[in-house]
Amino acid sequence: MARQIGEVIVDLQNISLRFGGVKALTDISFNIREHEIRAIIGPNGAGKSSMLNVINGVYHPQEGKIIYRGEERRKMEPYEAAGQGFARTFQNIALFKGMSVLDNLMTGRNLKMKATLVEQAFFWGRARNEELEHRKKVEEVIDFLEIQHIRKTPVGRLPYGLQKRVELGRALAAEPNLLLLDEPMAGMNVEEKQDMCRFILDVNDQFGTTIVLIEHDMGVVMDISDRVVVLDYGKKIGDGVPDEVKNNPEVIAAYLGTQH
Ligand SMILES: Nc1ncnc2c1ncn2[C@@H]1O[C@H](COP(=O)(O)OP(=O)(O)OP(=O)(O)O)[C@@H](O)[C@H]1O
């Protein structure tokens, strides 16, 4: 079935964020539609990671409104974002390097665990059933990402490209409806990038997950995104489908024409 882009789920209105005297974001408005792949691009220091952190509730903007599914969102903490079905990956991989792939993926299920600590410690009734259910879900993610062969390997021993895939896996284990990816392909070779692109497209296609991604590789961004928002020095300078953005003179001058 063809993927249908739905209604606006997150509407960012006139967002401004400052760190002391540094204006990280100035008066930025854009929206995210259900089931789309939405890219945020821009030169170094443009404010892209800050924007993800605003969406995720890590940073609280001084000005502006965030409308989530039609309602203004009050101040939200990151753990609440996870509870609402938001998951993210980081620019620098944030996994437990000494733990196996499987155990890292299980940490993605933490918020979904209902058994009490005592029940978990003694592996009693509810804890046991829960554990089996979480395992099943994690095994599905392992199959989906084709990482069966490394399920018992400590993450720190894996090549970089696979660690990035495991990080995506941990986010997927939480069954997110909004997935925020901070440079999912940074530092990868061409083959690893192709694999990652395929997984991102498959997640979007098969689970209908809405995806917001920051990515520096222009070829990748233009290929896989439905819409692209462009930031420069904390301001929005472009927003639209890839072809519109590619031909926007301000974007060409600020970003596409320069090396990053
Ligand atoms: N926690 C913070 N404290 C102070 N300044 C910050 C903080 N986070 C970001 N900034 C500043 O805000 C601006 C935007 O940074 P941000 O990391 O969002 O940009 P970016 O587009 O993600 O950059 P990059 O591509 O290099 O990761 C920069 O000037 C940065 O130094």
Image (cartoon, grey):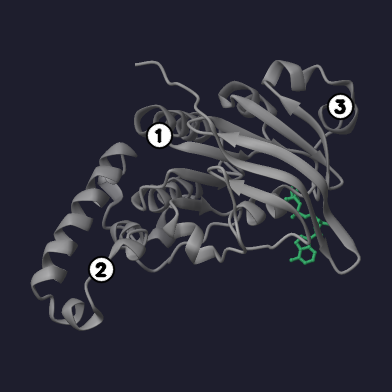
Q: Residue at x 49, y 37 (%)?
A: 210
Give the mark nearest the N terminus, 3 or 1.
1
| SS class, disc 2 | loop
| Label annotation for residue 257 | 3
Kindly identify the amino acid type of the residue bearing the numbered disc 2.
Answer: Lys
| SS class, disc 1 | helix
74 and 142: which one is in front?
A: 74
Give the mark nearest the N terminus, 3 or 2.
2
42 and 148: which one is in front?
A: 42
Q: Are marks 3 and 2 in contact (CB under 8 Å)?
A: no
Q: Nearer the viewer, mark 2 or mark 1?
A: 2
Q: Which residue is mark 2?
A: 114
Left or right: 41, with 90 as reference point: right
> For the view shown, which residue lies furthest in the left direction?
125
Q: Position of residue 56 (x, y in %)?
A: 58, 55
| SS class, disc 3 | loop
Q: Nearer the viewer, mark 3 or mark 2?
A: 2
> For the view shown, which residue lies furthest in the front direction?
71
Give the quarter of the figure containing the C terminus: top right
Spatial separation of the CA atoms under disc 3 and disc 1 = 32 Å
Decide if ligand 1 comes within 8 Å of the CB at mark 2: no
Q: Residue at x 50, y 28 (%)?
A: 194
Kindly identify the amino acid type of the residue bearing the numbered disc 1.
Answer: Val
Q: Position of residue 11 (x, y in %)?
A: 64, 41
Give the quarter of the figure containing the N terminus: top left
102 and 35: which one is in front?
A: 35
Q: Residue at x 34, y 65 (%)?
A: 110
Give the mark nearest the N terminus, 2 or 1.
2
Q: Which residue is mark 1?
A: 203
Left or right: 41, with 75 as reference point: right
